[in-house]
Amino acid sequence: MKKGSKLRILFYALGVLTLLAGIWGFVLRFTIGEQGANYGSYIPWGLWVSMYLFFAGIAAGAYMIASLEFLFGIKLFKGTGKIALWGALVTLPIGLMTIALDLGHLERIWKVFLNPSFGSIMAQMVWGYSLFFIIILVSLWVVIRKPQAKLIKPLFIVGVLLSIFLSGGVGAFLGINASRVFWHVGLLPAQFPFFSLASGAALLLLVLGWLAPNGDENRVKQLRALGLMTIALAFIKLFFLFTDFSQSLYAEVPDNVQAVKAILFGDGWWLFWFIQIGLGTLLPIIILWIPKIGQKRYWAGAMGLLVLIGIAVARANIVVPGLLVPEFQGLSTAFQGPHLGNTYFPSLMEWLVVSGGVGIAILVFLIGAERLPLWLTKSSHVPEAEVKQ
C-alpha cells in the first residue's frame, strides 16, 4: 500500500476506533457473561453466530479465490493469491472467536478435541476449521518462501475441498434441525459455498480497489473479472433466495411462512430490502456491470464493501428468523423472564464484541499487507516457463 495514502490512514483509524469500542465489549463478556446478551433460552443464537458464519465464509471464499492463481494457474489472477490467503488467515480466527464467545462454558472447548464424537456435525466443524487454519497458514508460508514448490497444488486441492466442505457443513449444521422448518431444507448446504465464494470475491474487490499498490498492469482486468464474478454470484444468490422463499410461501407450512414474512415484512424488513437486496445486491450488479465505472478502483472497492455488508445481513437473516417462531404453540407465554422471549435485537455488548473483532481484523490485515511480501512487484515477476512448472 502506498505510504501516507488517505485510505490507509482512514482504515487504520477505523480499526483503532472499532477495537477500542470492542475492548469494553470483551470486558463485559468476561465479567457479566451472557447476561449482557439479548439471546436466551428460546432464541439461543444471535449476532455472534451470524458473524461466525460471515467471517468463516469470507475465509473459505478467500481461499477459493487464492486457488485461481495457485491451483488453476489463471494468469489474470497472478499476484492476487497471497493477499487472498492473508485475508483468509485473518478472518477465520475472528469468526471462531465470535462463535467461541457465544458458548456458555468456553473453558470446556478442549473436550471436543480430546473426547470428540465425529458423528456430530459440530465436532466435524471444530476439527475441520482447526485443520483449515493450519492449511491456510502452511499455504501462505509455502507460496511466500517456496513459490515453485511441487507441494503447492496438492495443498490447494485439499484446501479447496475443505473450504467447500466447511461452507456446506455450516448449512448442514442448520439444516439438520428438523424442529426449525425454516432451516430444514436441502438447499442450505448447496447455497453456503456460493455465499462463501461471493464473500471472497467481494473481499478481493475491496482490497484490490482500495488498498493494493499501483503498478500491476493487470489490475483493471482483475477488477473487471472479479466484478463479473460478483455479478454472477449475486444472481445465483437471488435464485436461491427466490426458490427458498417461494416454496416456503407456496407450501403454506405455518412456521415457515411466519419466518419468511418476518424477513420480508417484520421489524427488520428494511435490513432485507434496503441493505441485503438494495445496497448489497442490486446496486453492485448495476455499478459493476458498467465497464467504465465498475473497473475503476474506488468504485470496485466500494462495491466490494457493500457486497460484504449485504452478505453480513444475509447471514443474520438466515440465523435469527428461523428462531423467532416458537417451536410449539404457547411456548412464549408459558414462562416469563428476561431471556424467555421470542423477539431479538442484539444488545450493546453483542455489538461491541463484533466491533472488536472487526477492529482486530482490519488492523492485523493492514499490518500484514504492509510488512509481508504479499503484493506482486516488478522484481517478483518470473519467466512464464517457471510459472508453468
Image: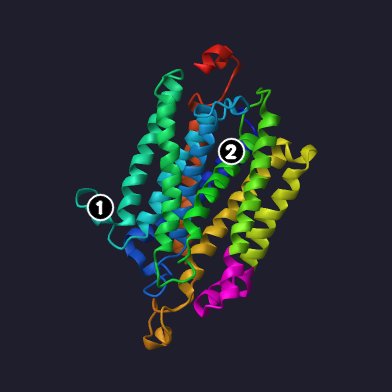
**Is residue 251 shown in magenta?**
yes
Please rate how many residues cluster around mark 1, counting C-alpha atoms within 10 Å: few if below 14, some from 14 to 19, many from 20: some
In the structure shown, which secondary structural element does the residue marked by tag 2 occupy?
helix
**Image: 16 above or below 346:** above
Which region of the structure is painted magenta? 244-269
Classed neighbour count for the residue bearing mark 2: other residues with Cα under 10 Å, few (<14), some (14–19), many (≥20): many
- Percent position of residue 342, x then y: 46, 78
Q: Is 100 left or right of 5, judged from the image as shown?
A: left
Which of 382 and 92 lies nearest the eye of the viewer? 382
- Give the mark nearest the N terminus, 1 or 2: 1
**Amino acid at dot 1:** Val
Residue 369 belongs to the span the image colors magenta: no
Where's the N terminus, which quadrant?
Answer: top right
Q: Nearer the viewer, residue 116 or 343?
A: 116
Residue 184 lies, in percent from the top left, at 45, 66
Image x and y of residue 132, in percent: 38, 40
The numbered dot on residue 210 is none
Element at label 1: helix
Q: Main secondary structure of the magenta part?
A: helix
Q: Which residue is mark 1?
A: 112
Q: Position of residue 94 (x, y in %)?
A: 43, 47
Q: Is residue 333 left or right of residue 274?
A: left
**Quadrant of the image occupied by residue 377:** top right
Residue at the spot 40% in from the left edge and 45% down from the top edge: 93
**Residue 20 at least partly seen:** no
Residue 204, which numbered label?
2
Q: In the image, what residue type sits under mark 2?
A: Leu
- 173, above or below 85, in the image: below
At 34% from the left and 65% from the top, the residue drawn is 32
